[in-house]
Amino acid sequence: MRMLLTARLDTETANRAATDGTMPKLIDDIVEYLKPEAAYFTPTEGERTCLLVFDMQDAAQMPPLTERFFQAGAKVSLRPVMNLDDLRTGLSNLAR
């Protein structure tokens, strides 16, 4: 299932990771694990934020994925999302 992961990193922890050079490894490890179809990075209300769209094959992926962000002091949310093709398919199924 296509999922959107939003991770808002604690500012103090993220500042330390950016300064000590551990931030790139954190991001690289997560991207390598998830292989997201899209990855975006933006500030949100003063916090560094990662937005990753990926295919979740199994709910058992959640602990190893979210733990990496939790250890970095992040607030993490996961939610299912659709692309335009998914939406069109879903809407056409309503008409049946």
Image (cartoon, grey):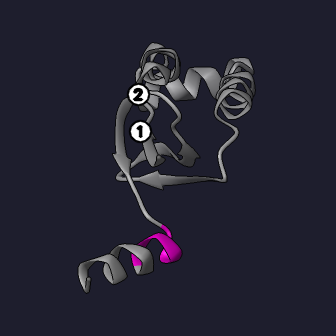
User: Does residue 51 lie above or below 82 as drawn?
Assistant: above
For this rendering, which residue is in front, 66 or 55? 55
Q: Residue at x 52, y 76 (%)?
A: 85
Mark 2 closeness class: few <14, some 14–19, many ≥20 residues within 10 Å:
many
Tell me, for residue 60, which label it has, or none.
Answer: none
- Looking at the picture, how far across and down is residue 28, in whole percent? 74, 30
- Most extreme residue toward the front, as rendered? 96
For this rendering, which residue is in front, 54 or 95? 95
Q: Residue at x 66, y 53 (%)?
A: 37
Give the amino acid at mark 2. Ala
Q: Does residue 69 appear to the left or right of 27 in the view shown?
A: left
For this rendering, which residue is in front, 39 or 82? 82
Mark 2 = which residue?
Answer: 74
At mark 1, the secondary structure is: strand
Q: Is residue 77 magenta?
A: no
Mark 1 closeness class: few <14, some 14–19, many ≥20 residues within 10 Å:
many
- Looking at the picture, how far across and down is residue 59, in whole percent? 41, 26
User: Does residue 86 lie above or below 20 as drawn?
Assistant: below
Mark 1 = which residue?
Answer: 8
Q: Residue at x 43, y 44 (%)?
A: 6
Evaluate if marks 1 and 2 touch, with contact meaning CB atoms under 8 Å apart.
yes
Residues rendered magenta in the picture: 83-87
Considering the whole magenta stretch, tell me its main secondary structure: helix
